[in-house]
Image: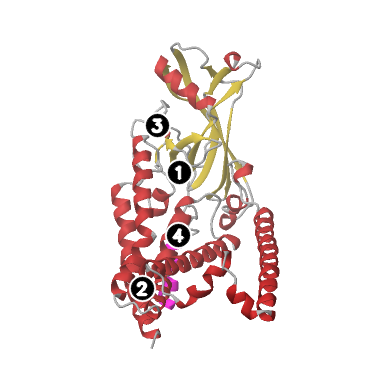
Amino acid sequence: MKNLSFFLITTLFAAFSAVRSDPSDHRYKEGDSVPLYANKVGPFHNPSETYRYFDLPFCEPGDLKEKKEALGEVLNGDRLVSAPYKLEFQRDKESISVCNRKLSKQDVARFRSAVRKDYYFQMYYDDLPIWGFIGKVDKEGKDPSDYRYFLYKHIHFDVFYNKDRVIEINVRTDPNALVDLTKDSEVDAEFLYTVKWKETNTPFEKRMDRYSQSSSLPHHLEIHWFSIINSCVTVLLLTGFLATILMRVLKNDFVKYAHDEESAEDQEETGWKYIHGDVFRFPKFKSLFAAALGSGTQLFTLTVFIFILALVGVFYPYNRGALFTALVVIYALTSGIAGYTATSFYCQLEGTNWVRNLLLTGCLFCGPLFLTFCFLNTVAIAYKATAALPFGTIVVIVLIWTLVTSPLLVLGGIAGKNSKA
């Protein structure tokens, strides 16, 4: 059990390593190059839809390099590449030109479509995430045909440091430096950036706190625990009311049968009374029934674990990589519960081929889930979204799941088989 707990903790930590910084590193001297990576772009109101940053015709650096990413970063949809902006440590810059570009009609149309959908961009500076909008819509008239679309061409970086470490970075855009994208015509655009460094007293160890307390994503998508608790209480109350009504109906029937047993036997059975003999009858598909019971028990345990981890604040807002990794690991660790429940119940139903039942238990949920994932991943690849997982990552996930799930499933099944005796 201790080994399993250690494996779970280390795996979760590996998933969070894309966001949490190592306090022993990230020290710089004045003028040192601090890594800045461009990550992705996507519509503000649909955070799950993201694309590579340079899928839009931004200025590309001369030495475009892709960052080697951890498993958590890949699962989170991150695709980090070197950014065209140079932010040296404690070096202020004023209106530095990145590039001069002549945007073609196709480029203008792509940028205009992105601005219309409220696209934002995301970057990482010294492992700190930053977000900003790529443009704005000027709704001068009520008719959408009168709207005007503008692209921001001047980005301001405000960086806060404490001695030799980067503590915080914010990005804002110049509302007066705009490129008009309203018409389908070529446009000349010069992209600029400004860097301002400011000193702060915030310690390096607390620089990630602001990301666990807030998010740049829409507020209506954030977790509201009061709403969750309210929904749970509502469900419990409705269940209690339904149980009370059913008990009153059943109680009346029981009292009636107790007073007049002979007449009750002569009456024709209807409704729920048909099931009174089913407790003595084995189900027709007992192997499938036992496998469904085992998978259901495992999913319930998985839900409880994830809910507890979310309550204690393990997951950063919308860290899909951490959540996905936790789902894979905890599902694999709880596979022994599924094997034990399914096999013990199957043997009590006088089932003989418990090995086949164990295989069915292992595939009952994961089989359809894998097929659904393959379909969704294929769609993401077709649309060139960053949510698409590379083949190598899929192989790693399958190996992790298989190497942990299969042994625990077998152990749970062997234990469940012996529990009958």
Q: Nearer the viewer, mark 2 or mark 3?
A: 2
Q: Is residue 34 left or right of residue 241?
A: left
Residue at point 57%, 21% (across, down)? 177
Question: Sequence order check: which comes first, mark 1 or mark 4?
Answer: 1
Q: Which portion, as a residue range, is magenta? A: 1-14
Q: Is residue 314 left or right of residue 376?
A: right
Three-letter residue code for mark 2? Leu
Q: Is residue 339 visible?
A: yes
Rendering coords of residue 227 (x, y %): 67, 53
Rendering coords of residue 164 (x, y %): 53, 50
Distance in Å between CA atoms under marks 2 and 1: 45 Å
Residues under numbered marks 3 and 1 in contact, where contact means CB atoms less than 8 Å apart: no
Residue bearing mark 4: 327
Question: Sequence order check: which comes first, mark 4 or mark 2?
Answer: 4
Location of residue 143 (image quadrant) = top right
Question: Sequence order check: which comes first, mark 2 or mark 3?
Answer: 3
Residues under numbered marks 1 and 4 in contact, where contact means CB atoms less than 8 Å apart: no
**In the drawing, what numbered circle is on residue 111?**
none
Q: Secondary structure at mark 2?
A: helix
Residue at point 46%, 12% (across, down)? 184
Rendering coords of residue 233 (x, y %): 69, 61
Q: Specify whether residue 98 is painted magenta.
A: no
Residue bearing mark 3: 54
Distance in Å between CA atoms under marks 4 and 2: 16 Å
**In the drawing, what numbered circle is on residue 408?**
2
Question: Sequence order check: which comes first, mark 2 or mark 1?
Answer: 1
